[in-house]
Image (cartoon, rainbow, N blue to C red):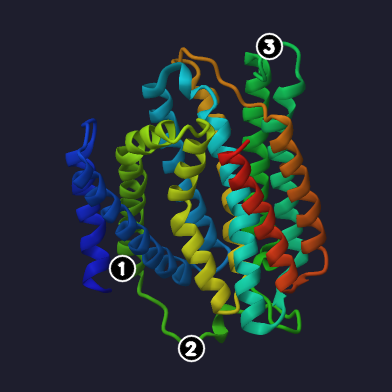
Amino acid sequence: MSRWTVVVPLLAVVALVLSWGRSLPGFAVALVALCLASAVLAAVHHAEVVAYRVGEPFGSLVLAVAVTVIEVALIVTLMVDGGAKSATLARDTVFAAVMITCNGILGLCLLVGALRSRIAVFNPEGTGAALATVATLATLTLVLPTFTTSRPGRQFSSAQLGFAAVASLILYGLFVAVQTVRHRDYFLPVTQDGEVRREEESYAPLPSRRAAGVSLVLLVVALIAVVGDAKAVSPTIESGVESAGLPQSVVGVVIALLVLLPETLAAVRAARRERVQTSLNLALGSAIASIGLTIPAIALATVWLSGPLVLGLDATHMVLLALTVVVGALTVAPGRATLLQGGVHLGIFTAFVFLAISP
């Protein structure tokens, strides 16, 4: 294990402790941002060690769940501190995570995989099941609040929010059971001929249990540092967004981009190794975890959060979500993708970012 991958997460945590709850000058913000970027790289390294030890699809699941759990903590913390202006923060961050994973990461990985092997190959059964789960969760939690009538202003009533939270947890648990137990082969990398690529085909030695255990601990430490340092620089992000005259929703986009950096890098590196299925497991698994774990946690947090919780999307975002689902289904169905499919998804992601800045 490289020394820097051990030292960097610890330094990032020190930066988090020293900056927590303080107003930082410009040089301190730059220093914390540097620690954040370094912690992202360390997190990717440790995630790959753990993933290689436990095998797919468990490796992708470890990173997706770890990032999402800490992302939830960040969202709840910011909502507690933000008051009424944070009413849409959960919605903006979760929707941004869906767009980043289902278009940004997915499109980038298909592009890298197609450049590497001309055709990016993956398993349509597993990927299609994951996309269907994302579409269902996003519709239940982000679209329906716009049309319900029990509460004004794109909000769920308490009973509706409770139903959405329970349904999200059940769907997430069902997906994990299918991915890791009942139909695990659907989520394993495949060869250009469509055959499942078994882990035994790799000739690199497996890391020891001790090394994998240390990497798991350091992965959690690095991810805590990433999210905590992101919170430390978030006041600077918010003031910069406000000074530039940009919509408040841009804050959610920036937070989601920062939090999902480890998964993005890990997914791209997997695609470069011709393991596009692993990349898609990371992308879609992160989207499922982001909704399936965040909404229940936010629903529980409303017990002590006093402000409103706006979850319903506006018309523009619903169009982007519908386009993502339709294009994603067309991409997934053949089990093979070219540069074009990757470019189309990246085009949708670019449109999302542009419209977030200029609605």
Residue 7 pos. (x, y %)? 20, 62
Which three-letter amino acid code belongs to the residue tagged 2? Tyr
Looking at the image, residue 134 sits to the left or right of residue 217; the answer is right
Mark-to-mark CA distance, 2 and 1 = 20 Å
Residue 293 appears in view: no
Foreground: disc 3 or disc 1? 3
> Are the residues tagged 3 and 1 within 8 Å (C-beta)?
no
Mark 2 and mark 1 lie on one chain; the one further toward the N terminus is 2
Q: Which mark is residue 151?
A: 3
Residue 167, located in which quarter of the rendered image? Answer: top right
At x 50%, y 49%, the residue is 65
Looking at the image, residue 359 sits to the left or right of residue 83; the answer is right
Q: Which mark is residue 36?
A: none
Mark 3 and mark 2 lie on one chain; the one further toward the N terminus is 3
Looking at the image, residue 240 sits to the left or right of residue 300; the answer is left
The residue singled out by tag 1 in the image is 210
Residue 137 pos. (x, y %)? 69, 39
Residue 126 appears in view: yes
Residue 336 position (above or below residue 157): below
Residue 169, located in which quarter of the rendered image? Answer: top right
Which three-letter amino acid code belongs to the residue tagged 3? Arg
Mark-to-mark CA distance, 3 and 1 = 52 Å
Mark 3 and mark 1 lie on one chain; the one further toward the N terminus is 3
Label 1 packing within 10 angstroms: few (<14), some (14-19), many (20+): few
Q: Quadrant of the C terminus?
A: top right
At x 65%, y 35%, the residue is 168
Which three-letter amino acid code belongs to the residue tagged 1? Arg
Residue 130 pos. (x, y %)? 70, 53
Residue 219 pos. (x, y %)? 35, 57
The residue singled out by tag 2 in the image is 203
